[in-house]
Image: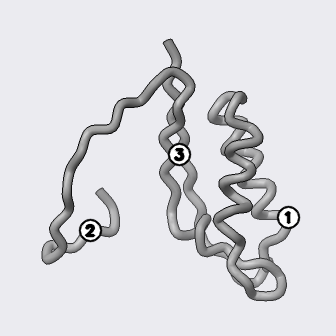
Amino acid sequence: MLGISQQTRYSQQEIPIYIDDLVIILTDGVTEARNKEGEFIKKETLLNLIKKYKHMHPQDIVQIIYEAILKVQNPHKKDDMTILIIKRVN
């Protein structure tokens, strides 16, 4: 786990993952990317991209998200970005 604190208690649960479901893990460099006006890129924008391209291979979805962020991101306010998408197939 990343970003955990010893003082924080987390609950656990199991969630079934069905065929074509996606598990998406990203760093704050993705969720806190800022556009040229200094505003955070909206989470809805990221979710819409994922929904639009969910039928594609996970590597392609990652590339689309990465390129979309680079197009609007303030070049002077860059952070590292990590995006991991796992897709369940048969």
Query: Crowding near pointer 1: few (<14 within 10 Å), some, many (20+)?
Result: few
Q: Quadrant of residue 4?
A: bottom left
Please provide percent x and percent y for residue 55. Answer: 70, 28
Residue 50 place in picture, x, y as percent: 68, 46
Q: Secondary structure at mark 3?
A: strand
Q: CA distance from mark 1 to mark 2?
A: 31 Å
Earlier-in-chain disc, 3 versus 1: 1
Cα distance between the residues tagged 2 and 3:
19 Å
Quadrant, the N terminus: bottom left
Residue shown at the point (16%, 68%) measured from the top left: 9
Q: Which badge, 1 or 2, comes first in the chain's sequence?
A: 2
| Residue denoted by label 2 | 4
Neighbour class for label 3 at 10 Å: few (<14), some, many (≥20)?
Answer: some
Q: Say whether residue 88 is left or right of residue 5.
A: right
* Left or right: 64, with 83 as reference point: right
**Residue identifier under label 1:** 71
Query: Residue lying furthest bottom in this view?
Result: 38
Residue that carries the numbered disc 3 in the rendered image: 84
Residue drawn at x 83%, y 82% as measured from the top left: 36
Q: In the image, is residue 38 above or below residue 59? A: below
Name the image quarter holding residue 2. bottom left
User: Residue 25: where, in percent of width, then height?
Assistant: 48, 51
